[in-house]
């Protein structure tokens, strides 16, 4: 008899006194954890299937359920941890690459939490955002170096195409296929209502969502799924995806079971086929090649749309960004190593890339030193968790932030990190009709609007506290930041002083 070495990580604790056997948990769990035993007249659980998504806990009408971490443990070993041992057992069982979803959960430094924000006291008084205007409007795109005048002395508009955001936050790339139709509709509607943008990801644009074009960034990735002239011309900007923080250096893989008829039509690929985007763009091996694609896309869209180049935060990111800033791109998006994903090899997700805070500071400094900072705007993402992270990112040199995991949390995601299984109980990372209908776009879009409005208000409060009334004045203003518990080297890379200095 084969022995199962892998023990359940979680225990389902059911309070039998409270349980009314309504079977809601059984009907709600796509992982088939709960089952009613009609002989015993009792609800039972198969804990080996539980991913700890909390759907049953949230919907149990009598609050009879609790999911707790199993206290089954191996003999203590700081080197061979339970997680390391379980991975070995899994691979010995399957011979497969370990897969995961969402962002890197390892306890690596979170620099945002080691950076503190300034506030005015006595001199340079704070500004009250409830009584005085605060400007969070953000324009993304290359800025001209000179003011050009015609013969009559009138200023000539030489401003390249810009994106206008009401607040410096956008929804990052998540493809239709990796997330559901209703999740995409929620993002598109919220972006439109808020005056910001959402991003199609690499899956093309569903025909129903062309109407949200002015608030849409359309993405061109190595697989070129769903890319055509209408797609390029519908978005407000075009993003070339060179890399992604969750899986730098490798391509994407949407399993065939997520490629439903609708997804296949949008991606322009056969239904049920795996959508595999290669690691490189097969026409890009240098900055000159990238420049050709940037200008091909500008040509295809009449030079009316800014082109974004998205890269993962990796070693030498500043040099790479310097090349991109000379390629004709208008915006560089940098995705940190904590960025989320619908599916990635676990080892890549947890071990490749660098923190976005260090990458951003290094890129901003390099572009300033080279006198080309105005060639591009910088957008950063990869686990921006709060309005405070946004403020710190902007003070470190970003023009705006991308959020994705935070947006999915607003839609109900409980970070079970099982998106790659395609059975998301919250109707987000799934294409199963019985699950996708659980996310109501009316509710979802309103929750996203609420989140961004709350963050915008907090951003204004923090700006006001610093005596700053315009987001422009915060950009790259590292004097507003201080580090705590950081080494000299880390402070130097971040370009900030230590607290107390
Ligand atoms: S949802 Fe709660 S009350 Fe209903 S069967 Fe499950 S545990 Fe019992
Ligand atoms: S989107 Fe769904 S499957 Fe993915 S982590 Fe969130 S709750 Fe889990």
Image (tube, rainbow, N blue to C red):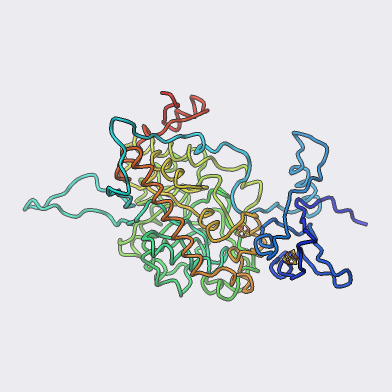
Residue 229 x/y as whole percent: 40, 69
Image x and y of residue 106, in percent = 63, 42
Task: Give the camera-side residue of 39 and 97.
Answer: 39
Q: Residue at x 70, y 52 (%)?
A: 97
Answer yes or no: is residue 332 visible: no
Which quarter is ligand 1 in? bottom right
Q: Which residue sits at x=51%, y=65%? A: 444
| Residue ranking furthest to the front | 17
Given residues 197 and 448, the one toward you in this image is 448
* Above or below, 415 relative to 352: below
Above or below residue 397? Residue 195 is: below
Work out whether 222 lies above or below 149: below
Quadrant for the N terminus, please: bottom right
| Position of the C terminus by quadrant | top left
x%, y% of residue 192? 39, 65
Residue 82, located in which quarter of the rendered image? top right
Residue in the foreground of this view, choosing between 131 and 225:
131
Name, please, the residue furthest toward the left: 152
Q: Taking the image as drawn, is residue 8 in sight?
A: yes
Residue 10: image x %, image y %? 75, 52
Residue 79 found in image quarter? top right
Drawn side of residue 268 relative to residue 8, left or right: left
Residue at (28, 33) in percent of width and height = 124
Which residue is at a point 73% across and 60% down the rendered structure image?
64
Front one among 45 and 137:
45
């Amino acid at each position: 008899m084969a022995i199962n070495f892998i023990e359940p990580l979680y225990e389902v604790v059911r309070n039998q006194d409270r349980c009314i056997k309504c079977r809601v948990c059984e009907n709600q769990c796509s992982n088939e954890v709960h089952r009613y035993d009609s002989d015993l007249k009792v609800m039972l659980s198969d804990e080996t299937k539980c991913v700890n998504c909390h759907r049953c806990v949230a919907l149990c009408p009598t609050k009879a359920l609790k999911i707790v971490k199993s206290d089954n443990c191996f003999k203590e070993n700081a080197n061979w941890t339970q997680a390391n041992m379980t991975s070995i057992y899994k691979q010995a069982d399957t011979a497969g690459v370990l897969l995961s979803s969402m962002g890197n959960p390892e306890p690596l430094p979170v620099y945002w939490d080691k950076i503190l924000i300034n506030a005015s006291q006595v001199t340079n008084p704070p500004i009250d955002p409830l009584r005085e205007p605060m400007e969070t409007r953000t324009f993304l795109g290359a800025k001209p170096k000179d003011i050009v005048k015609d013969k009559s002395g009138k200023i000539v508009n030489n401003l390249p195409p810009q994106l206008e955001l009401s607040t410096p936050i956008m929804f990052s790339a998540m493809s239709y296929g990796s997330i559901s139709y209703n999740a995409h509709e929620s993002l598109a509607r919220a972006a439109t209502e808020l005056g910001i943008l959402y991003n199609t990801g690499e899956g093309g644009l569903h025909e129903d969502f062309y109407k949200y074009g002015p608030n849409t960034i359309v993405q061109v990735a190595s697989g070129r799924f769903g890319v055509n002239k209408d797609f390029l011309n519908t978005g407000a900007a075009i993003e070339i995806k060179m890399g992604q923080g969750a899986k730098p250096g490798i391509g994407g893989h949407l399993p065939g079971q997520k490629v439903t008829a609708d997804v296949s039509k949008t991606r322009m690929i056969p239904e049920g086929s795996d959508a595999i985007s290669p690691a490189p763009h097969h026409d890009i091996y240098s900055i000159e090649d990238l420049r050709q694609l940037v200008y091909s896309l500008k040509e295809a869209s009449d030079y009316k749309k800014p082109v974004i180049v998205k890269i993962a935060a990796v070693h030498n990111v500043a040099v790479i960004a310097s090349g991109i800033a000379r390629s004709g791109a208008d915006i560089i998006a940098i995705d940190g190593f904590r960025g989320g994903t619908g599916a990635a090899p676990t080892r890549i997700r947890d071990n490749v890339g660098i923190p976005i805070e260090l990458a951003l500071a290094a890129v901003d400094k390099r572009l300033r030193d080279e006198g080309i900072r105005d060639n591009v705007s910088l957008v950063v993402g990869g686990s921006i968790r709060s309005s405070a992270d946004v403020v710190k990112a902007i003070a470190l040199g970003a023009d705006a932030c991308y959020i994705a995991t935070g947006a999915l949390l607003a839609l109900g995601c409980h970070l079970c990190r099982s998106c790659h299984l395609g059975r998301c109980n919250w109707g987000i990372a799934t294409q199963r009709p019985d699950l996708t209908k659980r996310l109501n776009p009316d509710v979802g879009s309103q929750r996203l609007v609420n989140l961004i409005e709350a963050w915008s208000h907090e951003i204004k409060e923090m700006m006001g506290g610093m005596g700053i009334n315009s987001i422009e004045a915060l950009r790259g203003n590292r004097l507003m930041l201080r580090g705590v518990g950081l080494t000299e080297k880390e402070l130097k890379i971040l370009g900030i002083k230590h607290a107390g200095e």
